Every structure is written in C-alpha cells, then in structure tokens.
Image: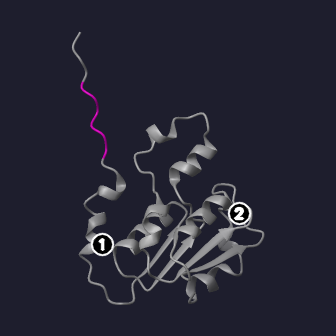
C-alpha cells in the first residue's frame, strides 16, 4: 500500500505575508488599533509592532487557546489551533493608551481571561470598563459603548 502524503499545514495567521504589510504602511502619528473578540488578538499584535496613538479592545482575551480549552475541555485544543492568538505575549510591548471594554455577562470570554490580559500591559496605560447588562454579542448595544470607542482613554 502506498503511503499518502500528509496535507500541507496552513501557515499560521501571524506569519502570513499580508500581515507583515503593516510594517510597510507609513506611520502618520495618528494610527489607532481596534479589535473586537478574536480581532483583539490582531489589534494587540499590531499595536506591539508599530506606534499607535490608541488601542481599543472589546471583549478581549489573554489567549485563544486558554479560552477554547475552557469552552471545549474534552478536545485537544492545543493540537487543533494553528494560531493561539496569545495577546499576553504582545501586551507588554504596547506603549499606547489602551481602552478595554468587557461585557458584564460575557458568555464567550471569561472575565478572568480579560483581566489576565489587562495585567500584562505596562502600568498606567489601561482604562478598563465593564459595560453593565451586556453579553459578548450585545456589548455594542450599551449606551456607553460608542462614547468609549470614540473618546480618549
């Protein structure tokens, strides 16, 4: 019987050529980085690699692997995830004022994971807000949401 070659593994997100394009975009001094949920991992990465004037994270987490392992304890998550989205690794490199918006009743990202991420940023950079009565998918319905997104930290 002839051996079947293994399928080529896809390249992890953070190693894709298009993401490296962020280094080619000239900095205007007014760049901002915003990420919601999974996008928060990308936003933290971008803010750690180039100067931004403000970072806004909505329902962020410290590590996608950590959150997935809590949601799916019987699956070998560490083997299945190609990208871990380990924001905790990049957070210490961020120098911009950072706003973190957490949902009071987030059913996807446990508050502990958001707080772990918060603890990894440099002291004095974080403005942390818990939006009352909101869930992971309803946080944008809070009257506080848009002013916090638009405002300065």
- Residue 137 vertical position relative to residue 30 in the rendered view, above or below: above
Q: In which quarter of the image is the N terminus?
A: top left
Q: In which quarter of the image is the C terminus?
A: bottom right
Q: How crowded is mark 1: few (under 14 residues within 10 Å), some or many (20 or more)?
A: few
The magenta span reads 5-10
- The residue lying toward the viewer, choosing from 139 and 124, is 124
Our reading of the magenta stretch's main secondary structure is: loop
The vertical placement of 130 against 18, above or below, is below
Question: Which secondary structure lies at badge 2?
Answer: loop
- Residue 1: assigned label: none
In the displayed orientation, state which residue is furthest to the top: 1
- Which of the marked residues, 2 or 1, is nearer the chain's N terminus? 1
Per the rendering, the mark at residue 135 is: 2
**How far across and down, in percent of the image, does residue 127 sit?**
61, 81
Residue in the picture at 70% in, 73% down: 130
Q: Which residue is drawn at 30% across and 56% down?
A: 15
Q: Is residue 132 in the magenta section?
A: no
Q: Is residue 121 left or right of residue 21?
A: right
* Res 22 label: 1
């Amino acid at each position: 019987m002839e051996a079947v070659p293994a399928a080529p593994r896809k390249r992890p997100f953070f190693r894709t050529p298009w993401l490296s394009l962020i280094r080619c975009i000239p900095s205007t001094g007014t760049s901002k980085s915003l990420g919601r949920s999974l996008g928060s991992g990308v936003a933290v990465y971008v803010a750690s690699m180039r100067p931004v004037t403000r970072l806004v994270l909505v329902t962020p987490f410290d590590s996608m692997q950590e959150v997935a392992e809590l949601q799916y304890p019987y699956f070998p998550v560490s083997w299945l995830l190609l990208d871990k989205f380990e924001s905790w690794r990049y957070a210490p490199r961020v120098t911009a004022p950072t706003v973190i918006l957490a949902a009071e009743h987030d059913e996807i990202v446990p508050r502990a994971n958001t707080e772990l991420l918060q603890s990894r940023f440099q002291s004095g950079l974080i403005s942390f807000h818990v939006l009352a009565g909101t869930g992971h998918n309803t946080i944008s319905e809070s009257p506080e949401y848009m002013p916090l997104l638009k405002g300065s930290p």
